[in-house]
Image: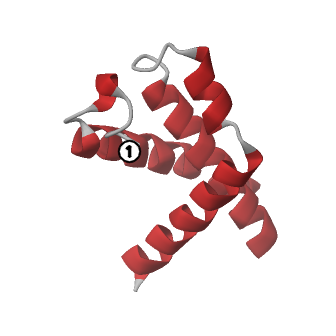
Amino acid sequence: MCRQYPPLQGRNALVRDAVEARYQALLDKHAHRLSDSRSRTHLQVACLVLATHRTLQPLLRDDEVWQALADPQLLLCARDSAARCLRSEHH
């Protein structure tokens, strides 16, 4: 994604680190809401979406970019990618 949008070029590591930090903070803040593995999955996805939005919003002002990011298929791919990353970090 960073290669496609000029405001993000050269900021891959910065964006990734900011999203990861926000994601973890949100996950920690709302961990008390977990009741089972399904709620954990929902919380993880919600935290990832919110952390990504909060990180990218100041950098991406174009409405078309946000519409593309909100594409359901893209969100499913992002969820699956995030899940793979989380699994690889814990193994």
Q: How many marks?
A: 1
Residue 29 relative to residue 32: left or right:
left
Q: Position of residue 36 (x, y in %)?
A: 79, 72
Looking at the image, which residue is at 78% across and 63% down? 39
- The quadrant the C terminus occupies is bottom left
Looking at the image, which residue is at 56% across and 26% down? 65
Image vertical order of residue 33 relative to residue 39, above or below = above
Looking at the image, which residue is at 51% across and 38% down? 52
- The quadrant the N terminus occupies is top left
Name, please, the residue furthest toward the left: 10
Image vertical order of residue 65 relative to residue 75, above or below = above
Q: Quadrant of residue 14?
A: top left
Image vertical order of residue 87 relative to residue 73, above or below = below
Name, please, the residue furthest toward the top: 61
Q: Position of residue 45 (x, y in %)?
A: 66, 54
- Label 1 crowd (10 A; few <14 / some 14-19 / many >=20): some
Q: Position of residue 20 (x, y in %)?
A: 40, 49
Residue 91 relative to residue 57: left or right:
left
Q: What residue did someone put label 1 on?
A: 21
Asked whether residue 30 is in view, the answer is: no
Q: Quadrant of residue 63?
A: top right
Name, please, the residue furthest toward the bottom: 91
Asked whether residue 69 is in view, the answer is: yes
Q: Secondary structure at mark 1?
A: helix
Which residue is more in the foreground, 19 or 10?
A: 10
Residue 2 relative to residue 78: left or right:
left
Q: Position of residue 74 (x, y in %)?
A: 65, 50
Looking at the image, which residue is at 31% across and 40% down? 3
Image vertical order of residue 77 relative to residue 5, above or below = below
Which residue type carries mark 1?
A: Ala
Which residue is more in the foreground, 84 or 9?
A: 9
Q: Quadrant of residue 40?
A: bottom right
